[in-house]
Amino acid sequence: MEVRLKEALWEGEEVRWTGRPKHFPLLGPDSKNGILITWIISGLVLAAMVLFLVPQIASGSRSISESLVMAAVALFVPGILSVRPFLDQRCLEQNTLYAITNYRIIAIVKEDLLYLPVGKELRAAVENRADGCGNLCFGTAVGQPVRKSRTLAVLGLRDDDSRFLMQGLMFYHVEAPDQVMEHIACMEHIA
């Protein structure tokens, strides 16, 4: 990650702060309801498939292989949606690096480089505080619904004209977020 950050720096760009998301619970207050609803719906789809297919298999009107294909197709989307919270948590905790430089706000998520330019117009706020940590929101990510926090942290809010430049960016569950905001406030006076 640090190597990727060094490679991404522009000429004359200096890193002022780096950090990573701190460990957070899978079913945190920002995502608990959405995850539980997804799991309940996935369970209902699974139960419906079992109730639909078992009698057909028992009566011989449908083969087991045909039933497995139908079940796989019907359960694909609910299965992916059910696994996504685990993947997002792992991605954020293990494969994410945040940085503030004299030019940009940078998030490296997996190997993707996401950034916003630093300037006086940059909106920034600390949201969703818990256990001495908080989400640092930048640009259009400020004020977004809490349930979107992890998605914003992984994907950002992209600008239509650029693969890397974002309209909004979120540093998820960062320790001592007010101190990080002080770095940004100092930079705005310089810019």
Image: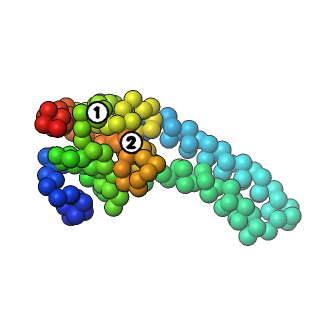
Quickly name the residue at label 1: 121
Near-viewer residue (65 or 80): 80
CA separation in Å, label 1 and label 2: 12 Å
Dot placed on the residue nearer the N-terminal end, 1 or 2 = 1
Residue sitting at x 56%, y 42%: 38
Which quadrant of the view contains residue 95?
Answer: bottom left
- The percent coordinates of residue 120 (x first, y second) are 24, 33
- The percent coordinates of residue 150 (x first, y second) are 40, 43
Near-viewer residue (157 or 120): 120
Near-viewer residue (164 or 172): 164
Q: Determine whether 178 is above or below 42 in the image.
A: above
Q: Determine whether 143 is above or below 38 in the image.
A: above
- Residue 159's disc is none
- Residue 167's disc is 2
Q: Please, what secondary structure does the residue beneath circle 1 have? A: loop
Type of the residue with mark 2: Gln
Residue 52 relative to residue 91: left or right:
right
